[in-house]
Image (cartoon, rainbow, N blue to C red):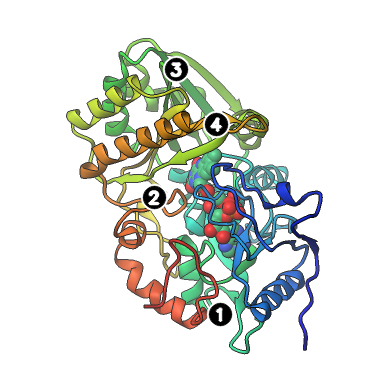
Amino acid sequence: MTAMLTGRVVRPGDADYTEASRGWNHLFIHRPAAIVFACSTEDVVNALTWSRHQGLAVRVRGGGHALEGWSGVDDGVVIDVSGMKSVTIDAEAHTATVGAGINQLEAVTGLSKAGFVAPTGTEGSVGLAGATLGGGFGLLTRAYGMASDNLLAAEVVVAAPDGGAEVIIADEQNNPDLLWALRGAGNGNFGIVTSLTYRIHPLAQAIFVVATWRGLTDLEAVFEAWQRCAPYTDNRLTSQLEIEGDSFSLHAALAGGTEAEALQLLSPIVSVSTPAVVVQDASWADIYAGFQIPLAEDPANWKFSSQFFTEPLPPEAVRIIAKSMAEAPAGCNYFTNAFGGAVADSEPSGGSAFAHRGALFYAEPGAGWGVRGGAPASDEDTAAALAWVAQVDAALAPFANGAYVNVPNAGMPEWESAYWGSNVARLRQIKATYDPDNVFSYQQSITAT
Ligand SMILES: Cc1cc2nc3c(=O)[nH]c(=O)nc-3n(C[C@H](O)[C@H](O)[C@H](O)COP(=O)(O)OP(=O)(O)OC[C@H]3O[C@@H](n4cnc5c(N)ncnc54)[C@H](O)[C@@H]3O)c2cc1C
């Protein structure tokens, strides 16, 4: 039977082609043969079947935030699931089943209306599925684990042996090895996830603390206090450091509790010098919505590099961060997120491919430059941003232990073991079972051999 494309199909020459081809990071521009905006699992099945019959490469796209542009492709088909936005909450079972197109802000908002939360990353416009399939950490991570730890089941469109596509379920009873792989290694590797079922958590209220230090004078002392406290403190508390320009901030969320408790737990950090401290007591959805930055204000181009640390950084490494920030081009930043807590304590039933449970914290040097919707960035600005990120990454590499697949390090040798450690061999076996023809393939996708 001849396959047909269904859903909204955009092709070269269509008025909305440029917009439809583009991901969030304008550093990478692709020219696909078609972008298929799927509204249903059937649209996805048809798109995958059609692409295979035509011999065209496929990429899966949700929120479109792939940092290296790997959800786009030249001359192939982008299967975009961002229109699949269903949400069904089972308040008694403490589960939610969502379409693969929901973004993190929509998830946080929708769950909150029913009195629940789930851990996600911090950027609202990132796809929930895209974040979950590579791990997914944020300000509720130490309380409830990675987003992927809370993934109970998924509906997945895989490449069928007959050259078409078929729908399968991955849960603890059906294809449990695929569920294991989707929890931390599922981005564009095994199939197209069309719906996800999560464990959700009742939470009426949270405390959010932002402490800001002006100048970089106190950075070394604050970093040292943070890395000795944040990964070990009460599991309800997750915190991040964000260093940018000539100031830096601590962002911390306490999942349920009082202002006094939050400030007490953070006192080893906020007692360094005299930061400006702002405290909010609100629903998690209000806190989350409050720290979103409108997309139009984001720079057009981005580069990040990811590192996990399993030991506190020695003073010379903290000095590298402080010196690098003092010398950074405009728009560069250094970001950290504390681990430990539930990530270290509790692996989900059935396990997971996420390999960084022993991390004390995650960190990334990042750069954003160029004006969204404006003239292209100059080659000099692009070169300076890329060079700064590469230089910070290289200087801290001797202290790092692993990298994060959701913030991929393009060009990194040994990237598979950096992302998944000793889980690589099992992931290759699972790839051979579910995608033996390597239909789902990109620069750093898992291969069967
Ligand atoms: C500004 C910004 C902030 C971020 N902050 C955080 C953070 O706080 N915490 C964190 O953990 N991560 C964070 N990330 C990383 C983020 O989790 C990844 O970029 C994520 O993969 C993006 O998902 P997406 O759906 O938006 O992107 P897409 O480009 O749509 O997809 C990303 C990858 O996932 C695959 N994919 C997407 N949907 C599916 C699907 N339904 N089935 C199979 N494969 C799929 C794509 O093929 C691609 O390989 C951040 C990224 C950005 C750009």
In the image: residue 187, left or right of residue 44: left
Q: Is mark 4 within 8 Å of ligand 1?
A: no
Task: Give the percent coordinates (x, y) of residue 288.
Answer: 61, 34
- The tag earlier along the polypeptide, 3 or 1, is 1
Residue picked out by circle 2? 409
Q: CA distance from mark 4 to mark 3?
A: 30 Å
- Labels 4 and 3 touching (C-beta < 8 A): no
Residue picked out by circle 3? 212
Residue closest to the eye, 289 or 144: 289
In the image: residue 332, left or right of residue 271: right
| Circle 1: element type | loop
- The tag earlier along the polypeptide, 2 or 3, is 3
- Labels 4 and 1 touching (C-beta < 8 A): no
Query: Does any portion of residue 205 appear in the rendered image?
Result: yes
Residue closest to the eye, 239 or 436: 436
| Circle 4: element type | loop
Q: Quadrant of residue 304?
A: top left
Q: CA distance from mark 4 to mark 2?
A: 22 Å
Residue picked out by circle 4? 377
In the image: residue 300, left or right of residue 235: right
- The tag earlier along the polypeptide, 1 or 2, is 1
Query: Does any portion of residue 241 appear in the rendered image?
Result: no
